[in-house]
Amino acid sequence: MIRSPLMTVMVQAVRKAGRSLVRDFGEVENLQVSLKGPADFVSNADRKAERILHDELAKARPAFGFLMEESGEVDGTDTAHRWIIDPLDGTTNFLHGIPLFCVSLALARDGVPVAGVVYNPVTDELFIAEKGAGAFMNDRRIRVAARRNLADSVISCGMPHMGRGDLGRFAREYGALAPKVAGLRRTGSAALDLAWVAAGRFDGFWERDLSAWDMAAGIVLIREAGGYVSDLDDGDKILDKGHVVAGNEFIRRDLLAIVRAA
Ligand code: IPD
Ligand code: CA
Ligand code: CA
């Protein structure tokens, strides 16, 4: 598989950040036993990975702007291009020694994500996609699952937790969906959820109250894997609205209808 110069830059940056996260992940377990816990250490690991991504990308494409979870926005001289970065998606998993987290990196052109990389450095699974060029996991082409019925489908979701989200609404959505599907899952990393939909592992995914950096890379992956992704009003304002539903043509449609009616 021949990678574009842009994708080569993105993959190098993400792998370097991933190496830093894996080193720190090894330390987290030791810190679990301390009374203070590893929370400070993890937010440090997070910032370190973001710094690596920023520095690598700024070196390769000095004119592009940035939207980063930890450091916010940095304007570029090229106003059309912006990197969207979540250096560690799945922080709670990381903190608990659960090896389900990733680096999520997207490039947006005029506000539209056109290239995305999601990398789980523990499993060494690298999901990449560029607009018009297909989606790949570790250089193998990926496609969304072909299942047409929710009854055969495994659907992933995000759940409200302490101080976040609307638990009542989620309970209604869950109640409406659970009896109709083969299984529901919650990984704790929205970027991985979307990548796994692209790879056909999950048949669908929905979540509310997300940020652009949780979703931008996954949107490109899903579309390039032949899937469909929208906001929960069936529109395209996913990054602005912060909610998302994804799957193949049939599953996304049915999932959206149930969630909206709940
Ligand atoms: C979180 C994860 C999680 C989602 C949360 C996000 P973080 O990102 O993607 O799956 O449910 O809403 O904030 O904090 O681990 O980068
Ligand atoms: Ca995140
Ligand atoms: Ca994060």
Image (tube, rainbow, N blue to C red):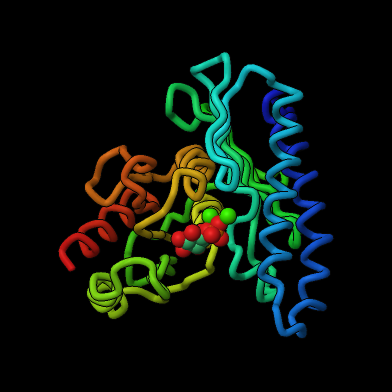
Q: Nearer the viewer, residue 184 or 94?
A: 94
Query: Can residue 89 be seen from the camera position used here?
Result: yes
Whole-percent x, y for residue 169 in the image: 24, 70
Whole-percent x, y for residue 103 in the image: 65, 50
Where, by quadrant of the figure, is residue 64 drawn?
top right
Q: Residue at x 31, y 38 (%)?
A: 237
Label total for image: 0
User: Ligand 3 appears in which quadrant?
Assistant: bottom right
In the displayed structure, would residue 109 be above or below residue 123? above
Where, by quadrant of the figure, is residue 16 drawn?
top right
Q: Is residue 232 left or right of residue 159?
A: left
Q: Nearer the viewer, residue 237 or 115?
A: 237
Query: Can residue 134 be seen from the camera position used here?
Result: no
Where, by quadrant of the figure, is residue 178 drawn?
bottom left
Q: Is residue 59 left or right of residue 180?
A: right
Residue sticking out furthest to the front = 36
Residue sticking out furthest to the top = 77
